[in-house]
Image (cartoon, helix red, strand yellow):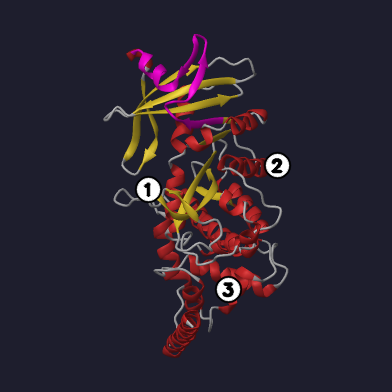
Amino acid sequence: MAGGVRGAHGAHRGPFARYEPRLRARRLVLGLLSGLPRKNCWTIAEWVGEATPHGMQHLLCRASWSADAVRDDVREYVDEHLHDDAAVLVVDETGDVKKGTRTVGVQRQYTDTAGRIENSQVTVYLVYASARGRAAVDRELYVPRSWTGDPDRCRAAGIGEETVFATKPELARTMIERFMDAGHRVDWITGDEVYGGNPKLRSALEERRMGYVLAVACSAEVITGAGTFRADALARKMPKRAWQKLSAGRGAKGQRFYDWAVIDLADPCPGHRRLLIRRNRTSGELAYYRCYSPNPMPLTTTVRVAGSRWRVEETFQSEKGPAGLDEHQVRLSPSWIRRVTLAMLAHAFLAVVRANEHARQSTSDDLVPLSCNEIQRLFITLAIRPLRDAAHRLGWSDWRRRHQKRSRTSHYQRQAASQT
């Protein structure tokens, strides 16, 4: 386990020109892996033994280092240690509920975190999912039109002048192309309806001869040899013999069995295109997927790819819990990019250690395999749990109260000035 930490730390030395930010980044990553109830610059700085949060804040805001270079190292690290010829790239977004209007990218929008429209910030992630494990390898913040149409607001949040509005499928395409252009190779992409309903993304993947299984709405129209039909209309025409019971992969409660049917689509372009339909064996609920592959593929392969999309939700849970992905308190774009990238590194470390432990040890019949959460607990407890004396704790209590006093005084002064 300790060897895994050295490997993860070594993976991000290149992007740092100086020793100081590299050391502090290592401390921040360890803090993200800690068992702290909240993981922000204040709590992490106290946990690692620093006297104030200024150093951690400097690391995220002003220190000289490249978050994109760290992202590239994370991608290399994940592909090296979790590589699988049957790996799938999963693209999906997750949201963080926020207060106020100054945090970069925030607006009232739908977020899966709350399951409704909330004041939130949405990020699109690219997750590498293989039989050995899964981890995010890229990230792009969704910046709504309400931001890109307001140059002053973008400037105040540190968004570059070259930034233009990009839809979530466009962000997904950028990350997929970045992954492939770096020399990596996967045969399949999967994602939800946001991405499956975008013709430009599908065309871009087909141009690169990348197979995809992308969810689409029931109202999506597809072209068959008999004409153009809605997806749900085709499902109603399927005979009983067309459905096959297949597993979409193992879940927390065992194999996830569904009924599946597939329909060949008509298209003059090279490649094989199909509509995949999934039926819940209990409720009868249907889901639809547009599929493409350069060469014919068995239904079992297509079903396996469709089931891979659910892994991204498990990845988000791991990153938001042990790696503190959603607990940042930064407003500016550069700080957000750096904080999220280091959280990706922290989770990648857990995913790689988990894969190595599973490969090296056979689990006893009365134990479940080690999870990322359990590895995090063992790592912090056995390897790096810091012990701080009473003077350190009292010093931080004084610092917090002094800061709160200044903030309160400043607030009262602004309030009094506004009333005169």
Tag 3: amino acid: Gln
Q: In the rendering, which numbered label is found on residue 41? A: none
Tag 2: amino acid: Asp
Task: Specify few, some or many for label 3: CA neighbours under 10 Å numbering under 14, 14-19, or 20 or more.
Answer: some
Residue 89: % across, % down: 55, 40
Residue 213: say if magenta: yes
Q: What element carries label 2?
A: helix
**Mark 1 → mark 3, Cα distance in angstroms:** 32 Å
- Of tags 2 and 3, the one toward the viewer is 3
Residue 340: say if magenta: no
What are the residue bounds of the magenta stretch?
Answer: 212-239
Q: Which residue is tagged 2? A: 181
**Mark 2 → mark 3, Cα distance in angstroms:** 33 Å
Q: In the rendering, which numbered label is found on residue 57? A: 3
Residue 136 in sight from this viewpoint: yes
Q: Is residue 78 above or below residue 32?
A: above
First in sequence: mark 1 vs mark 2: 1
Q: What element carries label 1?
A: loop
Residue 223: % across, % down: 52, 16
**Mark 1 → mark 2, Cα distance in angstroms:** 35 Å
